[in-house]
C-alpha cells in the first residue's frame, strides 16, 4: 500500500450521494480526505497522474495495470475538482475506445460507486450525457437505474444537460428511461425547462411527445422559442425529380407521405397554440406580450433620482400656481413663477446629469430620453405662457404642460420580445400563419412603436409576411396607413435601407438596389394615395427618406457595375481575339470541307502518349478546363440572380398560392 501526504487534497474519496427518487442532491456534499495515510506527494505523481492520463486517453491496459495494484482507486477522485477515473472517461469525446474503457471500469465498481459526484455535484452519467456519449450512458444506466434521477450542476438532471448541449440520441434514450417524465424526479418546472431546451436544440420529436403527454406545459416560453425557428417552418422547394418521386410514393402509400409532409415542428406549434387559445384572453395577451424588458440604463439610481426631482418640481409649480394671489397682477405672478421654475428645473436637472458622465450612450438611453423631454417641456411652457395674458389660459397651459410632463416622465414598461413581432422580424411566415388562422384578430396587434407585423415585415423585407395583406381583404386598407410613434407610415419604413443581412441575399450591389426599388414601388401601390406625400416627425416624405437612405447604396452600385463590366470585358476580349483571328485567316491553307486535319491531330496526339503516358493529355485537358470551371463557379450565382431579378421578381409579390385560409391546417 502506498501513502500520501496528509495535506494533499489531490486524491480524496468522494462520498456517495445515493438518494431516493424524490430527493435532490444537497450542495453540501462531503469529501473524505486521505488523512489516514502518510507519505510523500511523489506517490500521487506515480499513481494518480498515470491513472488520469489513462482515463483521459481511455487506455484500458494502462489503467488496468494500475487498478490491479490498487483496486480501491476506482472510487477515489484523482483531480482537485473531485473527478474519479469514470468521470474523466465518461466525458471524453475524442478517444475511440471510450465504451470499452467505461465498460471494464464499471464492472469493477459497485452501484453506489456510480453515484459518486465531483465538487460540482455531477455524476459520471451527467458528464456523459452532456458530452453526448450514448453508449457510455447506456452502460452506466444498465447497472444503476437510479442515475438518471440524480441531478448535477445547477440542480439539472442528466436529461436536461443532454438537451442543453444538443445530444439528440442521448435525450431520446434518457427520455425513455425517465418513463416519459413521469418519475418522481420531474415536476412541472423542470419539464417546462426541458421542453424549452428541446425546442432550442431542434428536437421537435421529443418536444412534441412531451406536450402531448403533459398538455399543461404549453407555455409562452415554448411559443417564444418557436417564433425564432424560421428554418423549422420553411418549405423547401423540390425539383421535378423530387415532385415525381413524391407522387409515386403517394400512389403507393398515401399515409406514409402524409406523415412525412407534416413536420414535427409544425405539429408541435399547432398543439401548443391550440392549448394557449383555449385560455382566457388576458392570459393569451400576456403570453404573446412576453416578459417586460429590464431597465437598460447603467445609471438606475440616478434615473430614479431624476424622476423624483422632476415630480417634486412639478408638484411645487402646481401648488404655487394655485396659491397665486388673485388680482390685476396675477398674470405677471404666474409668468414670473414659470420663469423661476424653468431656471430651477434646468439648473437642478443638469447638475444631476453631470454627476456621472462615464456611462456609455447605450447604458444612459433612459436619461437621454428624459433630458429630451425636459428640454421640450421647458421651451414650450415658457414660450406659450409668455404669449398669453389671461389668467385662466395661463393656468390651463401650466396644468396641461405639467400633466404631459408627468406622463412622459413615468417609466413605461416595454416588451421587445413580443412573440408575433419576433416571428415577423425573423421572417417566420408559416409560424404567423398558424397563429392567425385560429386568431384572426392578431393582425391588429401593435408593438411598443405602434407597428403591426406587416410594418415589421416591410422594415425587414420579408415578402412572405407582407403578402398576407392580399389575403385579409379590405382590412389591409386600414392597416397600411397606420403611423408609428415617429410618424412613419409603411412607405416611410420601406424608404429606410434594409438590414445588411437581407441585402446580402442578393449578389451584387446594383441588384440589391433594384430589389429596394421593387419594394418601394410595391408598397407605394398598397397604401392610399393621400399617404404617399405625408411627412414623418423628421419632416421627410417617403420619397425623400428613400433618397437619403440609399445614397451610399447607389454609389456602391455604380462602382460594382464598373468592376463587373471590366471583368466581363477581359473575357469578351479573349473570345473576340479568337473569333477575329479565325475570321481573317486566309482560306485555302488546309482543307476546310471536312475535319480530317483535326481528327489526324487528335489521333496523333494520343498515339504519341499511348505507351505509359496517357495521363499527360488528360492532365493537360484538365488544366485547360480549370480556368473555365473557376470562372463559371464565380459567376454562376450572379448570372442566376440577374435572371431572377429580371424575370422572377414579378412573382415576388402577389403570390398565386394562398396560405392563410386556403390550405388544410389539420394536423
Image: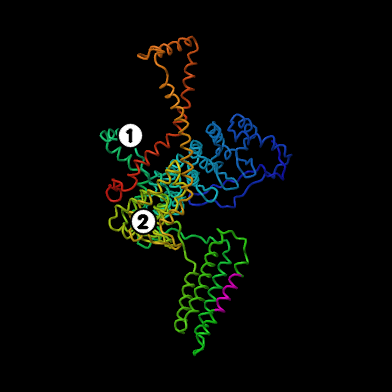
As for residue 391 lying within the magenta part, the answer is no
Residue that protrudes farthest toward the bottom in the picture = 327
As for residue 344 lying within the magenta part, the answer is yes
Residue at horizontal 31 percent and vertical 54 percent from the top: 438
Q: Report the residue marked by disc 1.
A: 242
Quadrant of the image occupied by residue 651: top left
- Give the extent of the magenta segment: 339-350
Q: Position of residue 59 (x, y in %)?
A: 59, 31
Q: Which of 211 and 365 is in front in this view?
A: 365
Left or right: 322 as drawn, with respect to 238: right
Q: Nearer the viewer, residue 439 or 480?
A: 480
Q: Where is residue 499 in the image (x, y as percent from the top left)?
A: 46, 49
**Which element carries disc 1, helix, strand or loop?**
helix
Whether residue 212 can be seen here: no
Q: Report the residue marked by disc 2.
A: 276
The correct choice, above or below, for 47 with respect to 271 in the image is: above
Q: Nearer the viewer, residue 661 or 146?
A: 661
Label 2 crowding class (10 Å Cα cut-off): few <14, some 14-19, many 20+? Answer: many
Cα distance between the residues tagged 1 and 2 = 37 Å
Residue that protrudes farthest toward the left in the picture = 251
Q: Which colour scheme is used?
A: rainbow
Q: Where is residue 133 in the image (x, y as percent from the top left)?
A: 51, 37
Quadrant of the image occupied by residue 359: bottom right
Q: Where is residue 311 in the image (x, y as percent from the top left)?
A: 53, 74
Left or right: 20 as drawn, with respect to 120: left
Main SS, magenta region, reads helix
Amino acid at each position: 500500500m502506498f501513502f500520501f501526504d496528509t495535506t494533499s487534497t489531490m486524491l480524496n474519496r468522494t462520498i456517495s450521494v445515493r438518494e431516493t427518487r424524490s430527493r435532490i442532491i444537497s450542495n453540501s456534499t462531503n469529501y473524505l480526505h486521505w488523512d489516514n495515510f502518510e507519505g510523500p506527494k511523489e506517490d500521487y505523481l506515480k499513481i494518480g497522474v498515470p491513472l488520469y492520463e489513462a482515463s483521459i486517453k481511455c487506455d484500458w491496459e494502462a489503467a488496468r495495470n494500475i487498478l490491479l495494484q490498487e483496486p480501491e482507486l476506482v472510487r477515489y477522485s484523482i483531480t482537485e475538482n473531485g473527478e474519479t477515473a469514470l468521470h474523466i472517461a465518461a466525458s471524453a469525446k475524442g478517444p475511440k475506445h471510450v465504451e470499452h474503457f467505461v465498460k471494464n471500469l464499471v464492472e469493477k465498481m459497485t452501484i453506489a460507486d456510480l453515484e459518486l459526484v465531483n465538487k460540482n455535484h455531477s455524476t459520471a452519467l451527467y458528464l456523459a450525457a452532456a458530452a453526448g456519449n450514448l453508449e457510455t450512458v447506456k452502460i452506466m444506466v444498465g447497472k444503476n437505474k437510479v442515475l438518471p434521477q440524480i441531478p448535477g450542476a445547477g440542480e439539472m438532471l442528466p436529461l436536461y444537460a443532454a438537451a442543453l448541449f444538443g445530444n439528440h440520441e442521448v435525450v431520446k434514450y434518457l427520455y425513455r428511461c425517465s418513463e416519459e417524465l413521469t418519475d418522481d424526479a420531474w415536476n412541472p418546472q423542470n419539464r417546462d425547462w426541458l421542453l424549452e431546451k428541446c425546442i432550442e436544440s431542434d428536437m421537435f420529436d421529443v418536444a412534441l411527445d412531451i406536450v402531448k403527454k403533459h398538455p399543461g406545459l404549453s407555455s409562452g416560453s415554448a411559443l417564444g422559442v418557436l417564433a425564432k425557428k424560421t428554418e423549422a417552418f420553411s418549405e423547401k422547394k423540390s425539383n421535378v425529380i423530387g415532385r415525381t418521386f413524391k407522387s409515386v410514393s403517394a400512389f403507393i402509400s398515401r399515409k406514409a407521405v402524409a406523415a412525412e409532409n407534416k413536420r414535427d415542428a409544425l405539429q408541435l406549434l399547432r398543439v401548443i397554440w391550440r392549448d394557449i387559445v383555449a385560455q382566457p384572453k388576458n392570459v393569451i395577451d400576456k403570453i404573446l406580450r412576453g416578459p417586460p424588458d429590464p431597465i437598460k440604463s447603467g445609471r438606475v439610481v440616478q434615473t430614479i433620482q431624476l424622476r423624483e426631482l422632476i415630480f417634486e418640481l412639478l408638484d411645487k409649480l402646481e401648488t404655487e400656481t394655485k396659491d397665486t394671489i388673485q388680482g390685476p397682477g396675477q398674470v405677471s405672478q404666474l409668468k414670473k413663477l414659470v420663469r423661476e421654475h424653468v431656471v430651477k428645473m434646468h439648473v437642478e436637472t443638469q447638475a444631476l446629469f453631470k454627476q456621472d458622465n462615464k456611462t456609455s450612450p447605450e447604458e444612459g438611453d433612459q436619461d437621454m430620453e428624459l433630458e429630451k423631454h425636459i428640454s421640450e417641456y421647458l421651451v414650450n411652457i415658457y414660450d406659450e405662457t409668455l404669449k398669453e395674458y389671461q389668467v385662466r389660459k395661463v393656468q390651463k397651459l401650466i396644468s396641461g404642460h405639467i400633466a404631459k410632463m408627468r406622463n412622459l416622465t413615468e417609466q413605461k414598461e416595454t416588451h421587445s420580445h413580443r412573440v408575433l413581432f419576433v416571428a415577423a422580424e425573423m421572417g417566420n411566415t408559416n409560424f404567423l400563419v398558424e397563429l392567425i388562422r385560429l386568431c384572426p384578430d392578431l393582425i391588429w396587434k401593435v408593438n411598443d412603436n405602434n407597428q403591426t407585423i406587416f410594418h415589421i415585415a416591410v422594415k425587414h423585407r420579408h415578402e412572405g409576411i407582407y403578402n398576407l395583406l392580399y389575403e385579409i381583404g379590405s382590412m389591409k386598407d386600414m392597416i397600411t396607413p397606420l403611423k408609428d410613434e415617429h410618424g412613419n407610415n409603411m412607405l416611410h419604413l420601406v424608404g429606410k435601407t434594409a438590414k445588411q443581412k437581407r441585402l446580402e441575399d442578393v449578389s451584387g450591389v446594383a441588384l440589391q438596389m433594384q430589389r429596394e426599388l421593387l419594394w418601394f414601388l410595391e408598397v407605394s401601390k398598397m397604401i392610399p394615395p393621400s399617404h404617399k406625400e405625408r411627412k414623418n416627425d423628421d419632416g421627410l416624405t417617403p420619397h425623400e427618406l428613400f433618397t437619403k437612405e440609399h445614397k451610399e447604396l447607389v454609389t456602391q452600385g455604380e462602382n460594382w457595375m464598373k468592376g463587373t463590366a471590366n471583368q466581363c470585358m477581359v473575357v469578351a476580349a479573349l473570345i473576340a481575339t479568337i473569333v477575329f483571328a479565325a475570321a481573317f485567316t486566309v482560306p485555302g491553307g488546309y482543307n476546310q470541307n471536312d475535319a480530317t486535319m483535326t481528327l489526324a491531330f487528335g489521333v496523333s496526339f494520343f498515339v504519341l502518349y499511348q505507351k505509359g503516358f496517357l495521363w499527360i493529355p488528360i492532365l493537360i485537358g484538365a488544366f485547360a478546363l480549370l480556368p473555365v470551371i473557376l470562372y463559371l463557379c464565380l459567376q454562376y450565382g450572379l448570372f442566376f440572380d440577374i435572371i431572377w431579378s429580371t424575370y422572377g421578381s414579378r412573382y415576388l409579390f402577389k403570390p398565386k398560392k394562398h396560405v392563410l385560409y386556403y390550405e388544410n391546417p389539420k394536423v
